Image (cartoon, rainbow, N blue to C red):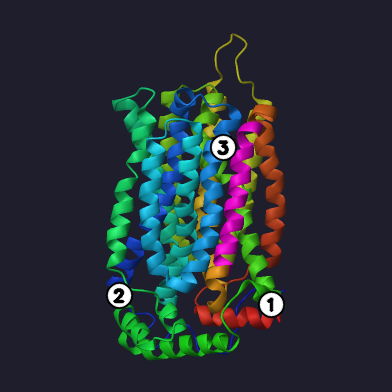
Amino acid sequence: MERELYISTNTASGPNSTTRTEPFVKIIALVATLGGLLFGYDTGVVSGALLFMRDDLQLTPFTTGLVTSSLLFGAAFGALLAGHFADALGRRKIIISLAFIFALGAIGSAFAPDVISMIASRLFLGIAVGGAAATVPVYIAEIAPANKRGQLVTLQELMIVSGQLLAYVSNATFNEIWGGEHTWRWMIAISTVPAVLLWLGMIFMPESPRWHVMRGNSQQARKVLEKTRAADDVEWELEEIEETIEENRQQGKGRLRDLRTPWLRKVFLLGIGIAAIQQLTGVNTIMYYAPTMLTATGLSNDAALFATIANGVISVLMTLVGIWMIGKIGRRPLVLVGQMGCTACLFFIAAVCFFMPEYYPAGDVNLLRAYLVLAGMLMFLCFQQGALSPVTWLLLSEIFPARMRGICMGGAVFALWMANFAISMAFPLLLAAFGLAGAFLTFAVIGIGGSMFVLRTIPETKGRSLEQVEHYFHELYK
């Protein structure tokens, strides 16, 4: 199956496509991706908090998995709800509402008196995390010029890993300065600050021009395009949006039953596959359980928390590299390199854990084994965050047709979070039953199947407007 986009419609690069993106677009992307920062912080902070929460809330391996994965279960349904309401109410209003849920969920988690309250609070917080994951990339993709869409949408991934790095640094700092069994409450509570900033910032941001056209308000769409495009690009892009939306309007409002249409169903299933392979590498077992795994290799709590900061630093640096590479070499090559690289690193970590003893004959901890496991994690994150993860969110924001974008994005991100939930829930049990070697070997074998999926199905969408991508899939899958 041919994977390049050869389409006879207008090119996505208008007359002045090489002109610089208006600064206002970058401000919009920066404010909206505070949702990604919160996404990253709220998923990353639990990695360090668990070390203290275990005693304070008397966690078992099962309840440890529940506390971690409850947020992810909530996120799955948050993605579905946000996907539906984003089409009805607009992307901007949904993000503003999610900011409020972020703040309430963080406060509830920080003051949770017992395991049940903690699980309930993180379940609620997950609605905001999943909603942001489904809505923010779509909002940015619809408001960004085609030639800058890749860099601006992948800013979401940069903010996610920056949020995780912030969580790791915060965990280590709170532990160093205050310590004690209640330190985890402060670790969680601090995320209310970016939630308030997101709420305030989005009040002043515009709605997506494509959503305005979907609602029959081309004048408002024109005003947004005039603020975010070179002057010569406004008319042709508005015309292209109107033509595609009109085609969709003739088919009626997007509904779940429309997925019975063969080409729409195939695009939707492709999106689910793209979302799933990003999680099936096991990336979030590293992001959520790194301190737990490193203490299992013999490191102290303090050393494990400090070492986890390296995971965050590498994630941020490699995401910057990934954003740069997307503009140079496109989506498909990066997904392929990322998937195969992650799989190789998983085999490396499994081999280290299997063949190297945990203790020396004298009874001392084998620190070389611990540091090789850490090195394997860092190499894994180079491929995951530098290639696979940024392209995942970008492709999901691009491949779905306009009238079905909210519903399909919500469904795909639901699948992503359910995979994340299942893996995060199972990992403590998998670790207890088979050790690090068995756990990582499982993900490595799954990674082989993921590589085959990438080779067979992932398209190249670089340099095309969302409308041209839609026409391509319609022709490919009809």
Q: CA distance from mark 1 to mark 2?
A: 35 Å
* Residue type at the position of mark 3: Leu
> Left or right of 183: which side holds 267?
right
Q: Which residues are magenta?
A: 408-429
Magenta stretch holds residue 184? no
* Residue type at the position of mark 1: Trp
> Left or right of 401: which side holds 476?
right
The N terminus, quarter of image: bottom right
Residue bearing the label numbered 2:
22
Q: Nearer the viewer, mark 1 or mark 3?
A: 3
Q: Nearer the viewer, residue 415 or 253?
A: 253
Q: Nearer the viewer, residue 410 or 337?
A: 410
Residue bearing the label numbered 1:
263
* Residue type at the position of mark 2: Glu
What element does badge 1 sit on? Answer: helix
Q: Quadrant of residue 401?
A: bottom right
Residue bearing the label numbered 3:
66
Label pair 1/3, CB-CB below 8 angstroms: no
